[in-house]
Image (cartoon, helix red, strand yellow):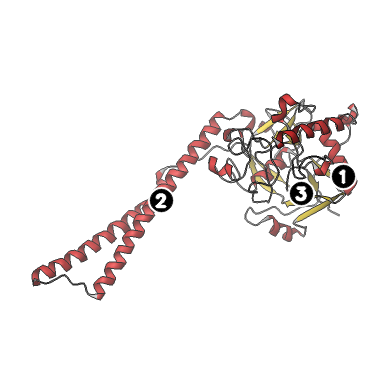
Amino acid sequence: MRELLCLVLLVSAVQASEMTCAASNEGKDRPRAKHSAHVWPLWDGKESNADYAVRVGLPATKQLNLGDGVTLNLVLIPAGKFVMGTPKPEYVNEGSFQKEIVVGQALLAAGVSISVILLLSVLYRAASGRRRPQLALARLLVLTITAGVGLYGGLQWRQAGEDFRTARLAYEQAKAVYNANFPEEQPAHAVTITRPFYMGVYEVTAEQVGVRGCPANFPVVGADWTTVQEFCRGFSTHTGQTIRLPTEAEWEYACRAGTNMLYYSGDLEVDLKRIAQNYDNAFAIGLVGQMAPNAFGLYDMLGNAMEWCEDYYSMNYYQDSPEIDPQGPKEGLERVIRGGEWRRAPGRVSSFRRNHRLPGFECTDAYIRFCVGFRVVCEVDEE
């Protein structure tokens, strides 16, 4: 109930701020992602973003002072390459696990066979001499070792089988998503982000835009795209930094954080539950930073509130999207939103799932569960 009341309060506050925005704001010059004159090293996909920051001589994190003791925390996202869009899942067959399975079976068979032979030989000697079975220390040691080898083999066989079943389950789930996917997310294509940038660790919160009456770390929702641009301009003016929305390519690259799975935590629904407030573990939009972050240290990139991007939306954009720093279509009617939101099922929330809204989409009481939030990007100063 508190979350819904906060949503209503935020929507009212945001709509009030929209009244002060002139209709001509849509045409105002906005900060756009820059093509860098500086050639930045690309992330190798293995080092942490903190290690990358050291390599290129930039701070790994940045904290902007918004005034009145309110701050905005950002983390460096390295320049790098990734595959954007819905990847076609690779088929998983038992052959890729066959070596571990065969080795496990062989060790189990050898360990059991030798152990049985040793025990039978002890029993035979005892029967021949008409005495109680006795096991010499050397034979006991050999029996212990062979039994251990057999046990290890059995466990390896079992683990390889479980790994195969898990991989097959993940493949079947990914295949179902791929087959049911919208063509707007295909084809998957290589993209290079040539310039590092800072991205908000969390979605922008009520406190950061001056909305009172809600918890400080409750995400801003209900602002249309044009009003969000006003917030970004205000942040830029106050901090002296270039603050803007991420491009769609920057957003997906930052969300994936080096992964190529459905979610940045894995391919299974249980993996999504660890990182996202969605229909399975939330009743409304919740406080930011409650779930596990991705490898770049970003929270709530999936679930909770959807997030505005800078780009115009086009269903066919991926068919001719540039490989280097794509900026989205030059014109359009709708803007891209990403990340899914709290009410969506796992199949509708992924690192590559695209959504879109008209820039003037208003979050009314009737659409309060569809409210869109945002997180910001801060340009790297090359001077």
| Drawn side of residue 353 relative to residue 108, left or right | right
> Secondary structure under badge 2?
helix
Q: CA distance from mark 2 to mark 1?
A: 54 Å
Q: Dots 1 and 3: beta carbons under 8 Å?
A: no
Residue underneath mark 2:
160
Q: Nearer the viewer, residue 205 or 338?
A: 205
Q: Of label 2 and label 3, which has the lower sequence position?
A: 2
Residue underneath mark 3:
197
Q: Amino acid at mark 2?
A: Ala
Q: Amino acid at mark 1?
A: Ser
Percent from the top left, x then y, of residue 246? 76, 41
Percent from the top left, x then y, of residue 55? 72, 60
Question: The N terminus lies in which quarter of the figure?
Answer: top right
Q: Is residue 278 above or below residue 157?
A: above
Q: Residue at x 64, y 46 (%)?
A: 291
Q: Amino acid at mark 3?
A: Phe
Q: Is residue 123 above or below residue 281?
A: below
Instruction: Report which quarter residue 310 is drawn in.
Output: top right
Q: Dots 2 and 3: beta carbons under 8 Å?
A: no
Percent from the top left, x then y, of residue 373? 74, 36
Q: Which mark is residue 236?
A: 1
Q: Of label 1 and label 3, which has the lower sequence position?
A: 3
Percent from the top left, x then y, of residue 355? 68, 31
Q: Residue at x 76, y 43 (%)?
A: 215
Q: Residue at x 31, y 67 (%)?
A: 145
